[in-house]
């Protein structure tokens, strides 16, 4: 079966996409619940600080590798996409190694200045786990772009089973090490990353990292910069609040985020299914405003309903879910809920900007929101502990929501010059036509013709690859 014939039908893709996101989101939710009930408030704060760092690093990698792959290669020729897959996966390994080294260095600095031991060990464990975590995440993007969400679900299922089997062994011990817990979490991702090589029949090539970033530089640099400024401000706020107030405040914010984490199923599922669809609509020249509005009102409305439910949950139920972390979570529930609801209502606009390849316009939103996130969140933490930080971050998020929609509406009305450059071949194609230049170049780099059960012969490509 070739890659194209292995694609799911439209309805099946939607079902399996949401199935995979349900598995990923619910496993993360379960992980946070288990840790909240198994660790002290201070240790859970250290664990939360590690998760904040992980969220930033994995999101940065997705912005520079996974999202550009989805936008650029969803409808590409199979051979072109295969070459891109090798480069993207290789870039994921390189990124994972580099960010892992940064985490190890950060752990050494934290140890040198006398930071909490468990926090140091958690960051150290994250550094060791980053290459596997990043590659497994990138395989998921590649599976979705090629219309294979069922394969992504199988990969995530194996990862989840291994993670929780190892975590179950560790939390049953009297002495619980965040270092070992983080490593166990990373081992599951590493197995999924290796499994992805067998599923795709693609061997990642870290040596082509620079080639990947050159080929997608019109997307990856701006997307990564947008994410870095935006999410980086949120991450920095967490560290500032931890310094000012202590890890317990971060634990309270993280505990509240845990209660909203089932909505990640909604956000991730819609994003994974909608981005390829919005990309095709953008390439057709049609407006994205209507689908973006429908998506945002649907997701935002459902998110608001979830917030109302959590606000009226009896404390007895909350304690059963989060244990000692419930009181802290309850204190920041409303502002953290406003942040989540705002994310739901802005989802259509932010995905629309990605589909329109207007990462430069996304940066305009970030330049408004990121300084406010850092400034208001830090001042709020200084004035009012965790509650003040949460309200400051909420105010910044609402401001960014307004800016994103205004900029998206402007971008949707602008000319799309890139459509003509990347249009499909004509019935009588001109080999010199500029619109085919990019895909022809990619195809020349990998002149593989022999397909056996969907697998391109690697030896043939290596033997004939041009110097």
Image: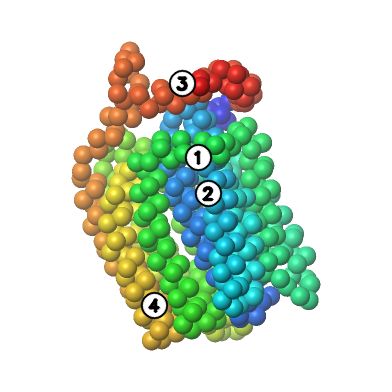
Residue 312, image x, y percentages: 48, 80
> Marks 3/1: CA distance?
18 Å
Task: Find numbered disc 2 in the image and state the secondary structure of the residue it sits on.
Answer: helix
Q: In this figure, which colouring scheme has been used for the structure? A: rainbow
Using the image, tell me which numbered label, if any, was put on residue 444: 3
Which of 442 and 347 lies nearest the eye of the viewer?
442
Mark 3 or mark 1, which is nearer to you? 1
What label does residue 95 carry, if any? 2
Mark pair 2, 3: CA separation: 26 Å
**Disc 2, disc 3: CB below 8 Å?**
no
Residue at the spot x=36%, y=80% of the render? 379
Q: Residue at x 68, y 66 (%)?
A: 179
Q: Nearer the viewer, mark 2 or mark 4?
A: 2
Q: Which residue is labeled 4 in the image? A: 378
User: Which secondary structure lies at badge 4?
Assistant: helix
Residue 232 is situated, as x and y percent measured from the top left of the image, at 42, 63
Q: Are marks 1 and 2 in contact (CB under 8 Å)?
A: yes
Q: Helix, strand or loop at disc 1?
A: helix
């Amino acid at each position: 079966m070739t890659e194209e014939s292995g694609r799911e039908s439209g309805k099946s893709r939607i079902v399996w996409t949401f199935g995979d996101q349900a598995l990923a989101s619910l496993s993360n939710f379960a992980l946070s619940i288990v840790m909240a009930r198994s660790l002290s408030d201070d240790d859970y704060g250290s664990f939360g600080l590690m998760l904040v760092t992980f969220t930033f690093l994995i999101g940065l990698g997705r912005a520079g590798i996974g999202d550009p792959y989805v936008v650029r290669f969803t409808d590409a020729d199979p051979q072109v996409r295969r070459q891109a897959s090798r480069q993207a996966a290789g870039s994921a390994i390189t990124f994972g190694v580099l960010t892992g080294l940064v985490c190890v260095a950060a752990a050494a600095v934290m140890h040198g200045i006398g930071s909490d031991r468990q926090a140091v060990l958690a960051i150290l464990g994250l550094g060791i786990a980053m290459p596997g975590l990043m590659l497994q995440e990138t395989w998921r993007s590649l599976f979705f772009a090629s219309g294979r969400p069922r394969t992504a679900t199988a990969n995530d299922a194996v990862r989840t089973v291994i993670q929780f089997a190892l975590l179950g062994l560790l939390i049953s011990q009297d002495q619980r090490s965040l270092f070992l817990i983080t490593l166990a979490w990373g081992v599951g991702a590493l197995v999924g990353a290796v499994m992805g090589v067998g599923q795709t029949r693609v061997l990642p090539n870290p040596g082509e990292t620079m080639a990947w970033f050159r080929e997608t530089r019109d997307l990856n640099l701006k997307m990564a910069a947008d994410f870095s400024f935006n999410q980086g401000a949120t991450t920095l706020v967490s560290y500032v609040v931890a310094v000012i107030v202590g890890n317990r405040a971060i634990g309270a914010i993280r505990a509240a985020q845990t209660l909203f984490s089932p909505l990640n199923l909604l956000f991730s599922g819609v994003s994974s299914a909608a981005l390829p669809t919005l990309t095709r609509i953008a390439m057709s020249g049609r407006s994205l405003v209507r689908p973006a509005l429908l998506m945002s009102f649907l997701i935002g409305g459902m998110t608001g309903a979830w917030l109302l439910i959590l606000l009226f949950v009896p404390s007895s139920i909350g304690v059963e879910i989060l244990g000692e972390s419930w009181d802290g979570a309850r204190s920041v529930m409303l502002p953290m809920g406003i942040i989540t609801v705002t994310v739901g209502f802005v989802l259509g606009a932010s995905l629309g900007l990605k589909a329109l390849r207007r990462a430069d316009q996304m940066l305009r939103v970030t330049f408004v929101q990121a300084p406010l996130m850092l400034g208001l969140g830090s001042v709020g933490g200084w004035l009012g502990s965790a509650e003040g930080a949460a309200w400051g971050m909420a105010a910044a998020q609402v401001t960014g929501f307004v800016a994103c929609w205004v900029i998206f509406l402007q971008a949707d009305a602008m000319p799309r010059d890139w459509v003509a450059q990347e249009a499909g071949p004509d019935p009588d194609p001109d080999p010199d036509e500029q619109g085919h230049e990019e895909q022809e170049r990619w195809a020349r780099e990998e002149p593989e013709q022999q397909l056996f059960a969907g697998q391109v012969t690697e030896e043939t490509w290596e033997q004939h690859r041009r110097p």
